[in-house]
Amino acid sequence: MIDDVVPVVENRPLTGGHFLLSVQSPRQAQATRAGQFAMVRLLDRSDVLLRRPMSIYDVKPAVARGRNVAPPFMAAGAKLRLSASRAEAGLPIASGRVPPGPTVATIIQLLYKVVGRGTHLMAELKPGDKVGLIAPLGHGFFVEEYLDAAQRADAVLHVAGGIGIAALLLPARDLARGGIRQRLFFGGRTKEDLVGLEEFKPLVKSIDVATENGSRGYRGYVTQRLETFLERNRSKKYLLMVCGPWGMLEASVRLAKRFDHPCLLSMENRMGCGLGVCLGCCIRVVGEGHNAYQRVCTEGPVFWAERVVFESTDCAD
Ligand SMILES: Cc1cc2nc3c(=O)[nH]c(=O)nc-3n(C[C@H](O)[C@H](O)[C@H](O)COP(=O)(O)OP(=O)(O)OC[C@H]3O[C@@H](n4cnc5c(N)ncnc54)[C@H](O)[C@@H]3O)c2cc1C
Ligand code: FES
């Protein structure tokens, strides 16, 4: 975890009040693993004191001649190893030593939606402005047990609701580099919410989109599309990786249980400190007493679905 003040390189407006913020931060970019997040602080804004949590959407490599660096995305010691050159070409990579590569990540990208004061001010950031960034935070997707589950499955199914897509690009890219078959189910309120689709196209076998107003793809919830798919492919074993609003998480967990697939959730609870101190991000998990709560910022943000207690429904039954 690195606390730094970093310059904005670009803050690109996308559809539907979404933005793609790129900041120059080599040390943080190189330390990042798929599924981790950053805490963003707007400098000189006494009206927005708390940092805002944002998934690390992407890290962009830049050429650094003569330097041998491991690609930034994977945990050290993880079984799935990447070759920088093959990875850049989108080719599957066998296990083994990480070969020398000419690329090094220097840019962190955050994909965000303007929803309130903090993100509204983020949208005003311009190239050359500076932001405070603590990153990378959380343990992300690729602790070894998650990789084992991905490698055992016939395919990984990414299920994204709205801005939840931001947590899934890095894992999708890592899995594609490891030759693991993937599909994306992506839902939004309208077609303007379906940002980042282009990035996924080279990584996944299929993309299934749904919008609540029917402006693109299936009219309804993306979990309905997921249900149809799982019905049709009952004999297959999938690993679900899900990020989105609470209701979508619950619906996905129900489907994972019904069809008996392992399921990982990337949680986006509201956060205070992001550092494990304030306990503001706790969720209920299976357990008793103090063990019944875990902090999304430090024990997450990624959890096995069966660990999470959805108190409003029977999901934990
Ligand atoms: C681990 C993690 C990763 C996240 N990744 C992203 C990301 O990649 N892109 C992105 O756009 N957002 C992401 N979020 C949500 C983001 O942090 C909030 O949208 C942001 O903090 C809102 O700040 P604000 O000042 O603009 O809104 P506020 O003024 O604080 O709130 C505005 C509205 O948004 C709602 N809101 C605020 N925070 C959340 C939240 N965490 N979940 C649901 N509703 C919320 C409030 O209830 C309120 O209705 C992530 C959150 C977490 C915990
Ligand atoms: S946000 Fe403070 S403990 Fe998690």
Image (tube, rainbow, N blue to C red):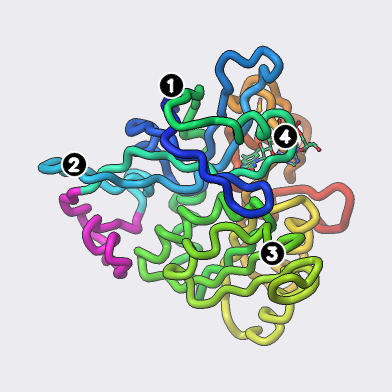
The residue mark sitting in front, 4 or 1, is 1
Instruction: List x then y, in percent, for residue 95.
Output: 27, 62
Q: Which residue in the structure is indicated by mark 3?
A: 191
| Magenta stretch, overall SS | loop
| Distance in Å between CA atoms under marks 3 and 1 | 35 Å
Q: Answer whether labels 2 and 3 touch (C-beta < 8 Å).
A: no
Q: Crowdedness of circle 3 by 10 Å Cα count: few (<14), some, many (20+)? A: many
The residue type indicated by label 4 comes to Arg
Q: Which residue in the structure is indicated by mark 2?
A: 64
Label 4 CB-ligand 1 distance < 8 A: yes
Question: Can you tell which mark lies on residue 4?
Answer: 1
Q: Earlier in the sequence, mark 4 or mark 3?
A: 3
| Distance in Å between CA atoms under marks 2 and 3 | 38 Å
Is residue 265 in view from this perspective? no
Q: Is residue 79 left or right of residue 51?
A: left
The residue type indicated by label 2 comes to Ala
| Distance in Å between CA atoms under marks 4 and 1 | 22 Å
The residue type indicated by label 1 comes to Asp
Q: Answer whether labels 4 and 1 touch (C-beta < 8 Å).
A: no
Q: Which residue in the structure is indicated by mark 4?
A: 270
Q: Magenta region: which residues?
A: 79-102
